[in-house]
Image (cartoon, helix red, strand yellow):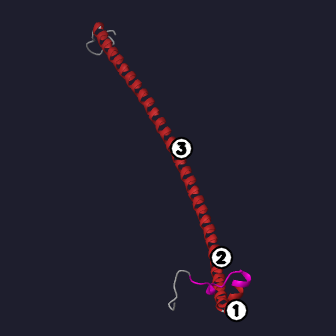
Amino acid sequence: MTETQCAGTCAADDDLRVIVDSHARRLNGLEDDVDTLKSGQSAMMEKLISVEAQGQERERNRAVEASDTRKALTDLTRQIAEHTGAQERQNKLAEDSLHRWRKFAVVAGLLCTISAAVGSTLLSDQEVASTIWVHWLHLREPWDMPVQGVPHAGS
């Protein structure tokens, strides 16, 4: 600058260079600080993106695990239902078999009772008993057999 351009006392050119150099150093320092902040911001953005990606991966894993758990529970429920159905069918078959055996036992009991009644009625008749023992079985009548080893009271 020239003296005519200055309104008052003008500073020497050396003074201006010192001031400009000082400002240049300060600007360089500010630029370095801005670059540091930008690199820090970039690193934080990368870390944030990484954290977000990890969170999304965890969420996908949880969704897969939940799906697997639901599928396992559905399969288990189906197996329990099948098992319960099979047990009910086995119980029904066992109950039917037991019912048949009970009918058979009742019929067999009735036949035995009727046979015993007829037999006792027929065997109580002396002539029928004699016919069965002598003519059919070819044996001696049990009441005609002598008792062995027991002496008679009258002898």
Residue 68 can be seen in this image? yes
Q: Position of residue 84 (x, y in %)?
A: 57, 62
Figure quadrant of the N terminus: top left
Quick one: 38 or 86, which is closer to the camera?
86
Label 1 vs label 2, nearer the camera: 1
Binning the other alpha carbons within 10 Å of mark 2 as few (below 14), some (14 to 19) or many (20 upward) gives: few
Q: In the visual, does 76 lie left or right of 34?
A: right
Q: Which residue is mark 3?
A: 64
Q: Which residue is mark 1?
A: 127
Q: Position of residue 137 (x, y in %)?
A: 71, 80
Q: In the visual, does 44 lie left or right of 109?
A: left
* Mark 1 vs mark 3, CA separation in Å: 94 Å
Q: Which residues are magenta?
A: 133-147
Toward the right, the furthest residue is 135
Residue at the location (49% across, 42% down)?
Answer: 59
* Mark 2 vs mark 3, CA separation in Å: 59 Å
Toward the top, the furthest residue is 14
16 relative to 103, above or below: above
Instruction: Kindly indicate the quadrant of the structure image that contains residue 17.
Output: top left
For marks 2 and 3, the one nearer the N-term is: 3
Tell me the kind of residue under disc 1. Glu
